[in-house]
Image (spheres, rainbow, N blue to C red):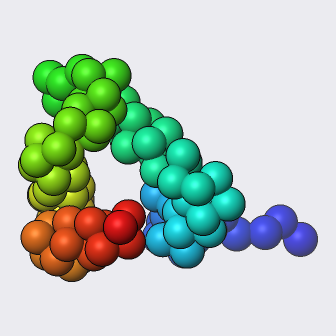
Amino acid sequence: MPQAAPQPGAYPAPLEFSFSQPPLHLALLSLCTIGGYEIYWFYRTWKQLKQQAGDQISPGWRTVGLFVPILNIYLVYKLFDRISDLRLQSGVGPMFAPGWLTAFYLIWCC
């Protein structure tokens, strides 16, 4: 007996690939590498924004900017703000405010 074709919408839509990483992984990798992984994470995230969102940025220079006092706070805030904007545009939902994330990051690093 032939099986009926599945109805449209009977299967859930496949998930799109995501580069997101659980915060616990970031924290553990940062601890294990004494903060070295954070630098790589920032570079990788800026590179992904350039490639996928079309941002006109230089990931390498932004990563170097993390070593410049005051500029690093601005760069971290702008990255968290951009991620927040992309989350809202894609309908994923709100996340913590970029200012709070930046403050937490600064406390975490000190």
Q: Quadrant of the N terminus?
A: bottom right
**Residue 90 rendering spot, x and y as whole percentages:** 22, 59
How many labels were placed on the picture? Answer: 0
Residue 76 shown left or right of residue 44 in the figure: left
Q: Residue 12 in the image: x percent, y percent? A: 53, 71
Q: Nearer the viewer, residue 110 or 60?
A: 110
Which residue does the image show at 20% across and 66% down from the upper left?
102
Residue 50 visible? The answer is: no
Q: In the displayed image of the protein, which residue is found farthest to the right?
A: 1
**Residue 95 location (% of width, % of height):** 23, 76
| Displayed quadrant of residue 30 | bottom right
Residue in the image at 21% along x and 58% along y: 80
The residue depicted at 33 percent of the width and 22 percent of the height is 60
Toward the viewer: 60 or 66?
66
Judge whether 34 appears above or below 40 on screen.
Answer: below
Answer with the quarter of the image where residue 58 lies: top left
- Asked if residue 68 is positioned above or below residue 54 in the image, the reply reads below
**Quarter of the image with the C terminus in it:** bottom left
Residue 60 in sight from this viewpoint:
yes
Front residue (pair 81, 11): 81
Image quadrant in which you'd find residue 65 = top left
Q: Residue 14 in the image: x percent, y percent?
A: 54, 59
Q: Which residue is painted at 38% across and 43% down in the image?
A: 42
